[in-house]
């Protein structure tokens, strides 16, 4: 993996992790559309993720194509101590290589997340890949997780969507984040 601060151009096949840009919105939408069962947002939403939420989002670029995306935001009222990971998409050929973890860690190491101690996300009960991702992230950071229903299938979704279970991870420390080494993505 190549750092976004690297002075040299990445070699073919290298993955570059960086903040999203406005021009990434269409490619992010296309990636999400190729990753069912992810909820497909409007292009407008993806453009907002790549602009208004760029500081708390990340893309993985390989050979000029967006191959991974994580969006997040600092939870209002949490005094910048909680980041909510909103959406994660990884191209099929890069799944299982800890790319989503690398994207999340890249966001957590940014200045805007200096006070973050808690990570939250919501996951549907049958999304095994997301459960493995977040439980593995907690294990890598040496912190605990707990779960609670955030949006109920019947009360909030009128039976048209599975419940969304909130996973809470933490407390995380910036010292641990600085020491965290992630594996290379081929």
Image (cartoon, helix red, strand yellow):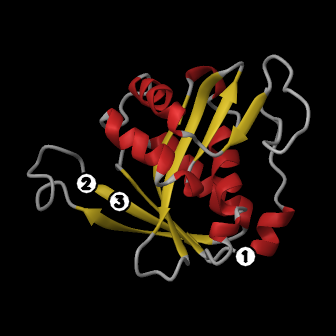
| Residue hosting label 3 | 165
Please report the residue visible at 84 percent of the width from the left and 53 percent of the height from the top.
181
Q: Report the quarter where the N terminus lies.
A: top right
Position of 117 relative to 107 (above/below): below
Nearest the viewer among 168 and 88 is 88
Q: Earlier in the sequence, mark 1 or mark 3?
A: 3
**Distance between the alpha carbons at the discs numbered 1 and 3:** 24 Å
Report the mark closest to the observer, 1 or 3. 1
Task: Identify the secondary structure beneath mark 3.
Answer: strand
Choose mark 1 or mark 2, whichever is in front: 1
For residue 15, say whether it is visible: yes
In the displayed orientation, state which residue is furthest to the right.
Answer: 8
Left or right: residue 24 compared with residue 139: left
- The spot of residue 38 in percent (x, y) is 37, 35
Cβ–Cβ under 8 Å for marks 2 and 3: yes
Q: Residues within 10 Å of mark 2 (few under 14, many from 20)?
A: many
Residue at left offset 73%, top offset 59%: 140
The residue shown at (41%, 81%) is: 77
Q: Are marks 1 and 3 in contact (CB under 8 Å)?
A: no
Q: Position of residue 177 (x, y in %)?
A: 77, 65
Residue identified by numbered label 2:
163
* Residue at the spot 30% in from the left edge and 35% down from the top edge: 42
Q: Do residues under tags 1 and 2 come within 8 Å of each other at their CB atoms?
A: no
- Tell me the residue that label 1 is attached to: 173
For the residues labelled 1 and 2, the Cα–Cα distance comes to 30 Å
* Residue neighbourhood size for the residue with mark 1, other residues' Cα within 10 Å, grouped as few (<14), some (14–19), many (≥20): some
- Badge 3 local density, few (<14 within 10 Å), some, or many (20+)? some
- Between 63 and 180, the residue placed more toward the observer is 63
Q: Is residue 85 above or below residue 43?
A: below
């Amino acid at each position: 993996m190549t750092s976004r601060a690297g002075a040299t151009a990445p070699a073919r096949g290298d993955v570059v992790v960086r903040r999203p840009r406005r021009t990434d919105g269409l490619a992010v939408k296309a990636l999400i559309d190729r990753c069912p069962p992810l909820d497909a947002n409007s292009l407008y939403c993806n453009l907002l993720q790549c602009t208004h939420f760029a500081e708390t989002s990340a893309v993985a670029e390989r050979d000029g194509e967006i191959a991974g995306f994580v969006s997040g935001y600092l939870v209002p009222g949490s005094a910048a101590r909680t980041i909510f990971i909103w959406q994660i998409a990884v191209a099929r050929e890069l799944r299982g290589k800890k790319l989503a973890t690398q994207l999340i860690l890249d966001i957590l190491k940014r200045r805007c997340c200096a006070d973050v101690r808690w990570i939250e996300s919501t996951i549907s009960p049958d999304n095994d890949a997301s459960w493995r991702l977040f439980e593995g992230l907690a294990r890598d950071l040496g912190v605990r997780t707990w779960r609670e229903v955030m949006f109920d299938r019947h009360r909030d979704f009128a039976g048209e969507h599975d419940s969304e279970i909130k996973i809470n991870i933490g407390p995380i420390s910036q010292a641990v984040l600085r020491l965290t080494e992630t594996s290379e993505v081929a």
